[in-house]
Amino acid sequence: MQIPVLILFFLGLSMVGFGQRSVQPNIVFILADDLGWKDLSCYGNSFHETPYLDKLAQNGVRFTQAYAACPVCSPTRASIMTGKYPARLRLTNYIAGSRVDKASPVIPPKWEAQLEAGETTLAELLKSKGYATGMVGKWHLHSKEAGKLQTQGPWSQGFDYSRMIGKNGLDYYNYSILKDSPQQTDYEDNGTTYLTDKLTDYGVEFIRQNAQQPFFLYLAYSAPHILMIPRADKLGKYMQKYDKFGGKYNPNYGAMLESLDDGVGRIMQTLKEQGLLANTIVIFTSDNGGLGMPEQGPTPTSNEPLRKWKGHVYEGGTRVPAIVSWEGKIPKGVVSDTYYSSIDYLPTLCELTGITSLPAKVDGKSQWALFKEPEKARISQRPLFWHYPHFSNQMGRPAGAVRVGDYKLVELYETHKLELYNLKEDIAEARDLSDLMPERTRQMHQLLADWRNQIKAQMPLPNPAYGQAKSEKN
């Protein structure tokens, strides 16, 4: 009789263990920084080596027309957290962005260089649903003003576990990590631990600590953003194949991207070890397009065949890689051409987790049906909008854009010039159709103008020094 009793005992322990596992889906949201649309090998880049992200795409859906809500980082991050267009939030440039052009007829409007503390974030919504919430890495949504980090940091925006990059976020061997407040430093590096690896360590720690309850991990890597500082042990092979690709790609960037890819592999391995793959949706994307010009070093990457790069409303600045995977719930190996925006993640994840009451004025639309059955999706006719009334560090000019179906209209705010492109036939935005299709141009411009009015988007202001600058130039 003792053997059956022992069997029942261990079965009972097993049932208790499994009973503690959440039936609510876990969420792992991994965000790369300045990763270009075609930088991953699964998107066709044969110079970079990204086997773990390639495997993630093989086990899920790879989107070819996913968009960031803004061509620079902070506004897109705010759109992910709130489901709102950056223009509605008045957070339309990266925090600390202040470039002007004295020779331009316009100057940027006054804008909110922060995510207002009163905005409801995805983390706060999930926390109210019983989720453990963790943020690791680059936050970049708080004001530069002294003391504002206390009320605008991740610890005050719904995250229970926060390991935020503190000082020197662009230096991969000379940085600090803040723990749950601006006053407590958890780790300070002096040249020993590569930042990308350290962030992965924290992501692994959070998953292991919360494996028995529903959790949301927002893992925001700083890589492959400049500075171009790779791990030395990963650089050699990229230097060796530099000439084979005609010098088109940056070896430092390739090595940095491989470290990020390794991090994704470790996160997936941790989920597997904890028995969580079947109950975890994993999303990977970028905050804007790749940086396609020299800035603090050689040009990091190429966005070809897309036009322009980070800081521009053309496709090179806004179209980003996106992979969604969930074992047993999302089909494997699917490539989808249906477009959506970073504003859509909040409502999608709310639908997935049973949150039916969204904050007021959320602009995004749930894409859960698309994620779950991408083969059934048709080309969207839903309008998507961009508003960037600034001068970017990457030479972008004040502009706005709207996409409807295959067509995209760009308005240059300095001259009010309109450009129209058919993205299905002209992904490079090389052939302006505005003169050939005046009625479509007019309709789409009206749509863009009406949207700006509806959300009270702040437009560039007249430059009072314009006449003087013009005279001095002449």
Image (cartoon, grey):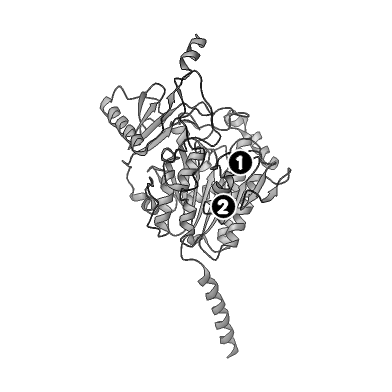
Q: Position of residue 103 (x, y in %)?
A: 49, 17
Foreground residue among 9 and 73:
73
Q: Which residue: 51% across, 67% down? A: 21
| Image: 62 above or below 457 | below
Foreground residue among 473 and 207:
473
Disc 2 vs disc 1: which is toward the camera?
1
Dot 1 amino acid type: Ala
- Residue projecting furthest to the left: 439
Dot 2 amino acid type: Trp
- Residue projecting furthest to the top: 474
Which residue in the protein does label 2 denote? 155
Report the Cα–Cα distance between label 2 and label 1.
Answer: 16 Å
Which residue in the protein does label 1 denote? 146
Check disc 2: other Cα within 10 Å, few if <14, some if 14-19, many if 20+: many
Mark 2 or 1 closer to N-term? Answer: 1
Q: Position of residue 210 (x, y in %)?
A: 57, 62
State left or right for residue 440 relative to residue 70: left
| Image: 179 above or below 257 | below
State left or right for residue 422 relative to residue 224: left
Q: Position of residue 442 (x, y in %)?
A: 28, 28
State left or right for residue 381 relative to residue 272: left
Q: Quadrant of residue 190?
A: top right
Q: Which residue: 48% across, 49% down? A: 57
Q: Secondary structure at mark 1?
A: loop
